Amino acid sequence: MNILLIGDSITEWGRHGDPEDLGTGYVRLIHDYFVTTFPTKKYMFFNRGVGGDRITDLAARWQKDAIDLQPDIISISIGINDVWRQIDNPDMDQVSPEQFEQLYNDLLTEVKEKTNAAIVLMEPTVIEEDSESRGNKLLPNYVSVIHSVAEKFGAIVVPTHKAFIDYLQADNGYKLTTDGVHMNPAGNMLMAKAWIQAAKQLLK
């Protein structure tokens, strides 16, 4: 079974220089969970995270990094940079929620037409470890898009944004990121746990 996880730097995390090209983030944790929990299964995991990617960048490499691999499962994590750059680089061309939805529809249409892959869509996580930050106020519009396209295409949603917001609201003081966006080991664990809980049945 071929499992592709594709997205931005949060997915990419540490994969360059890793002999298995999986990295040290949530992709590694998901891989390690399944190969040790189901040792008789034959899994091949692919990490195709690229730092800085927005959904427009994902679309530009979609054929090579997604369709050509012909995965059995494709997991997509995108959206943080589409929102973060509205704050960090307001002069850059922006991707509105409406454009985000159109592009996501286009990508998933290709998946349906050109592969037999089951689809897993991850909610974008957080921008700053503060549930009231500007980024976290903007993200729900993009999270809503993911739920909408998931329903249209019969995809599983991993509620990663909700998991992080719930954690932040518990206010225990333990950090999940290195800079408000990129995950430390605890943040990667939260992402992997949410993914496994949502999508485990696809890999059994």
Image (cartoon, helix red, strand yellow):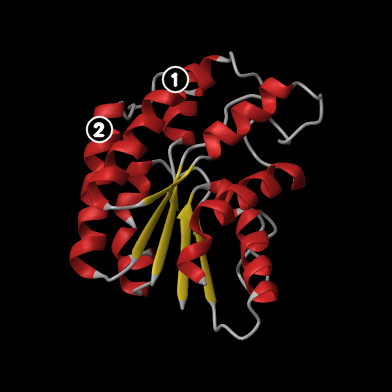
Residue behind mark 1: 138
User: Which x, y percent locates residue 21?
Assistant: 60, 69
Side of 133 where 109 appears, left or right: left
Mark nearer the viewer, 2 or 1: 1
Query: Label 1: few (<14), some or many (≥20) within 10 Å?
Result: some
- Nearer-the-camera pick, 119 or 79: 119
Is residue 37 in view from this perspective?
A: yes
- Nearer-the-camera pick, 67 or 151: 151
- Nearer-the-camera pick, 116 or 11: 116
Side of 64 where 27 appears, left or right: right
Count of numbered circles in the view:
2
User: Which x, y percent locates residue 7?
Assistant: 47, 51
Q: Give the Cα separation between the discs numbered 2 and 1.
A: 15 Å
Residue behind mark 2: 99
- Nearer-the-camera pick, 128 or 89: 128
Q: Residue at x 53, y 61 (%)?
A: 200
| Residue 156 against residue 168 in the figure, above or below | below
Give the structural element (helix, strand or loop) at label 2. helix
User: Which x, y percent locates residue 154?
Assistant: 28, 53
Q: Residue at x 60, y 19 (%)?
A: 131
The reply to whether dot 2 and dot 1 touch (C-beta < 8 Å) is no
Nearest to N terminus: mark 2 or mark 1: 2
Amino acid at dot 1:
Leu
Query: Label 2: few (<14), some or many (≥20) within 10 Å?
Result: few
Q: Residue at x 29, y 37 (%)?
A: 148
| Residue 193 against residue 30 in the figure, above or below | above
Give the structural element (helix, strand or loop) at label 1. helix
Amino acid at dot 2:
Gln
| Residue 167 against residue 203 in the figure, above or below | above
Q: Residue at x 34, y 58 (%)?
A: 61
Is residue 19 in view from this perspective?
A: no
